[in-house]
Image: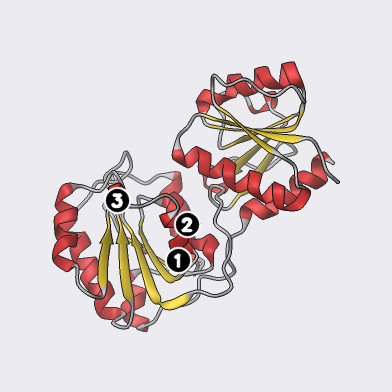
Amino acid sequence: MTPGSIWCVTDGLAGHRSQLRGLSEALQRRCHAPVVWLSPDSTPPEAPPWLILAAGRRTHWRALRLRCQYGGRLVVLMRPSLPRRLFDLCILPDHDGVPEGPRTWLTCGPLNPVAAQTTLATHAGLILLGGPSRHHSWSPEDLEQQLRQLRQALPGVRWTAGTSRRTPEATLGILATLEDSRFRVMPAQAAPPGWLLSQFQQCGIIWVTEDSAAMVYEALSSGASVGVLKVPRRHDSRVSRGLDALVEAGRLSTLPQLKANRDMPASGPPLQEADRIAARLIDHFA
């Protein structure tokens, strides 16, 4: 089956674009449908779409107008700002706490484009650092202690630490003091395009600060053994409770567990939610 095209309506935000990319690429692998990316002010092609995918509140009205004018099925990723009944389908992370229904499908975390890898280097470790956010504060001193404990617990691992644009300057200074032949730093501003995806394709051990929940789910999608570094919480949230549930289920490691076991256990089968949803979408809208 070769359906019509897939239109991805994007607001340009990296996280939203990543979710759209994950699902559209998974659909392409199965049905070879062409993908058209539409910004808020771009002109759509004349040929009507098979699916319209939208992510981000700024895209919802635009996507509804496109469906009204050109047809197609409208699928929104993440919890919409408008009533869900307006869309043909809503795909939401299960930590949102919305029950599944005929027009609401749930996923384990947000969708992403990370493909499961069959061969990963167990001596290659990746550390992904976020920064203070609406739900988390930040303690550079506590993070430094955790990084030193991590290196001590896994002495045979060569580490790469990647920062984000939220990572405070004080933390960058601490990372500079840790840098040596077995610990290198990749600042967000210096990372080339595609750097993070290439790391997911190589590193068998990944640790992520808990404020960066989307990256936790990306790491779990790669097939690596994944751990979570603690960050002070301003308050509990649906997202943080979702990560706690993954720890309870044995999908995520913590530093106390690592120090007790002296090894990184497998995180279970790789999450491949984009592929699962793509297969279900094709059956549903065939």
Q: CA distance from mark 1 to mark 3?
A: 29 Å
Identified at 75% across, 42% down, the residue is 33
Mark 2: secondary structure:
helix
Is any part of residue 4 visible from this angle? yes
Do the residues bearing badges 1 and 3 touch, measured as CB atoms within 8 Å? no
Residue under numbered circle 3: 190
Do the residues bearing badges 1 and 2 touch, measured as CB atoms within 8 Å? no
Identified at 58% across, 60% down, the residue is 115
Tell me if residue 38 comes above or below residue 141 in the rendering.
above
Tell me if residue 155 comes above or below residue 133 in the rendering.
below
x and y, in percent, of residue 42 in the image: 57, 21
Task: Determine which of the numbered discs, if any, sits on residue 197 in the image.
Answer: 2
Of tags 1 and 3, which is closer to the observer?
3
Give the residue type that dot 3 points to.
Ala
Residue under numbered circle 1: 252
x and y, in percent, of residue 119 in the image: 54, 75
Identified at 59% across, 19% down, the residue is 61
Q: CA distance from mark 3 to mark 2?
A: 15 Å
Within-10-Å neighbours for mark 2: few <14, some 14–19, many 20+: some
Write down the quadrant of residue 69 in the picture. Answer: top right
Decide if residue 100 is on the left or right side of residue 138.
right
Mark 1: secondary structure:
loop
Q: CA distance from mark 1 to mark 2?
A: 20 Å
Give the residue type that dot 1 points to.
Leu
